[in-house]
Image (cartoon, rainbow, N blue to C red):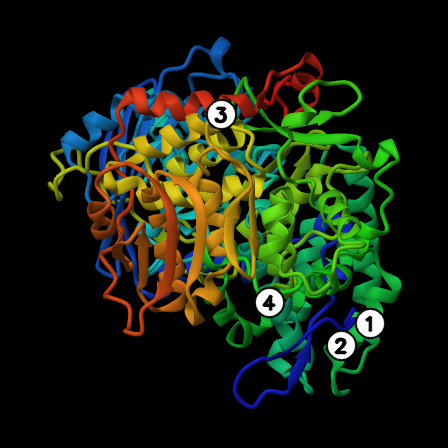
Amino acid sequence: MMAAAARVSSGGQAPIATLRAPEQVLRLARMGSFHQTRLSFMRVLLRHLARRNWQIERSLWEIDAKGAGVAVYEARGDGWVYSLIAFGHELDPEKRTDRVIAEEWDATFVLHDGVATRADIERLARNVPRQEAGRCSAAELVMSRANRSVRLFDHVVSELAQGRQPAAADLDAVGYLMRTTAVYGNGKFGLADRDRIAERPVLSGPFAAEMLTVWLIRAFTTDLVEHLATVRSPDTAVRLDRDLRRRLGVGNSTGLGMAPFVVNHPGLFHRWINARETALSRVLTLEHAGAAQVAVFRDRLARAWRQMAAWRVDDALQMARIAELVRDLDRLAAEVETIDFELPFVWRRLCAFAEAQLGLEAQELLVTLLLEPHGALVDDLSAAMGGDETPDFVIDGTATLADLRTGIEATYGFALAEDFTVPRAQARFWYVSEEKLEPRLGERALEEGAERELPLTVARDVAALHRLLTGVPSDLTIAEFLAAHPECRHAVRRVQLSARCHYAEVRDNLTGAELRPIDILRCKLSFFGATDFDPRSDRWVRVALFRHAPFPDELHDIASDDWAIPPLGRATRSAAAKAPSTGDITPSSPAEPEGYSLNEIEAEARKAARGTGLSWGLAEDVGRIARLLAHTRQLAMLADALDELKSGRHATGLISDRSGIRATEDRPLSPLVLASAIADRSAEIAEDTLTISAKVAEPRLLVPMLTSVAERLRRPLRLQLDGHEVVVGRDIAPALAALAEPRTVDTILISALPRGLDQASPPKTGGVTIPDELWRRFTALAALTYVPASEHSRLAGAGAGLSDND
């Protein structure tokens, strides 16, 4: 289990530990066997809330006898307030569906940044129930929706109304009263960009705002059934028993829309896996197992056996894996009874036993069990699981093709071993559906649209890049190579990133006929902390979130992190409920204007650039340019440049060599293509002047990329355009103002100034107002990347053609 991969220090005087090899950890079959751990995001969240004494209060309850109305839950701590605004809806049962075409739900939610005013609630009431069709503002962090469980919700209301508690077996058979079908964050539909909250306590971790939202939704669902039971029969209704209530989580149905995330965010994914593997290595480095830790491990093993034995799904393949897991846990328990825990490195011995004797499900569950007793040793790693992804876009243009070849052969052996001339190796293609603007998986031989596929073809593209390097001088720089082969930019970027981030790349072919997308889904959901994985096909899954976790009113009364593997027994505790307020809500700061988030702008510009025919690597850079331009009110010139590219009036061909950069055509050179070529030579700019000899259109569009180069070099840049000099620092506004007149230039010189970089301007997030006509120009180009849904895709993809009502 401890195949060599990398050597890292676990801190202090601890010995050097060896991490498991990426080739072992990041195969899809193993990723599809991951379980939640102490580092899962919802567990990290609750630990923080409890440790920092956060207080949660239901500040508003205006829900009628049919469950329609509004409720507000306020979470307060660390000097911040976050408000979950829950809208209940009276939904015709005929319209209750979890298909992606649904437009109405039993409940919709938004997490508001601050105390929600009446004006906020009224504004959000006009938008949140419409979900994708509405708009939020940068004052909102997360938006979600949920439907009631057909099997359980009304049953629990009926039982409570009659003065009875529902049977535990009935609760366990479903696991939730409501199931979310979307939990949106990070700039979707006008929500705040993650940059707004990235440095805040409690929300700094990955998906922390989303996890807080789901936890508060869970409180709403139980409050709702108790309210409806009381309305139905005020004389006999009882509240849900606390221990029974804890058995309920929030359901979630998720499909292919989630799958590309781990591929599209390779640096972030590396940090998740690296934290998990580092935690394991720290435990395995322990020479002696403490008596208290051994006792906790034995207890969690017994709990896990019971939890896994109760795991039931309809999927035959997963049910067979569960049966094997339970048998393996029996074997593990027998080994634990015979092993001498006084032996040195006993945790390593257990891992060696698991690797030799047990299946993947049990091996990965053992990782969870080994971390459970060692919170003091591993919990700090959660702080390293987020981070800025901007450096992940940097390409080292000074590296040689020899370096590139070495990087490919060191990391991508799995890709080089694949024969992509065989149809099965490219049987699938990922695309964005025109119907719902979400990722889908197509069959290359059966469906149209493969020419518009998403860049999840990493294995194929890197293998093609490796072949292309044959016969090319090995001392050629990457900057020179990419100028001639911009279609390779995306692959080169990934190869260089993977050299720095060993766990960035899934070590499997994501377009092959044997692909099971559900393995990617389960991996990501395990980091959320999801349990009760219930595959509905190989493309979508039901899970439960926060099952057995403390509720807000008991967060400080029971252990905040002793629930994910539920205890074998817990005493029932009674507590009086605080009467909710139905009065006015304390006002907060003025509402922020609605607009487009930076993430929305970046994503739409990236797709628009791809729609013009630019390669994915160049399109990624255009997205970053759009993000930096967003607050300057000059996005129109980016739209113009994209239109010029689409029409063929701007050229894309250039040569980048030791003499500088020059065009290969008479037409004006696109500044969007030139910007990437300049970025590749940032290290050279630090030492000398870079000369661009070409007729370049709209040089103002070079400024956003130059600010990134300046940031990287920590020095301002001197930009000379036909003799006119401009200084570019962190803030793009002065340079844009100095280049106010749009024009075409013939010569550009770029060099770094010797002085230090100016102070950073305050970060700007979200709420960018863009005229409708201008936005339509981007969306029209982006639409060229979408693929019309076929009947085959509707039936096969992400549950879109199946009912998920339960």
Labels 1 and 2 touching (C-beta < 8 A): yes
Lower sequence index among marks 1 and 4: 1
Mark 2 neighbour density, 10 Å: few (under 14) some (14–19) many (20 or more):
some
From this view, report whether residue 232 is shown above or below residue 297.
above
* C-alpha distance separating marks 1 and 4: 19 Å
Lower sequence index among marks 2 and 3: 2
**As shown in the figure, which amino acid type bears the numbered disc 2?**
Arg
Report the residue that reaches farthest toward the bottom.
13
Lower sequence index among marks 4 and 3: 4
Q: Regarding mark 2 in the picture, which secondary structure is present there?
A: helix
Q: Which numbered marker is on residue 352?
A: 1
| Image coordinates for residue 210, horizontal then vertical, percent | 42, 44
Mark 4 neighbour density, 10 Å: few (under 14) some (14–19) many (20 or more):
many
Badge nearest the viewer, 1 or 4: 1
> What residue did someone put label 3 on?
646
Determine the residue positioned at 28% across, 68% down: 757
Q: Is residue 218 visible?
A: no
Labels 4 and 2 touching (C-beta < 8 A): no
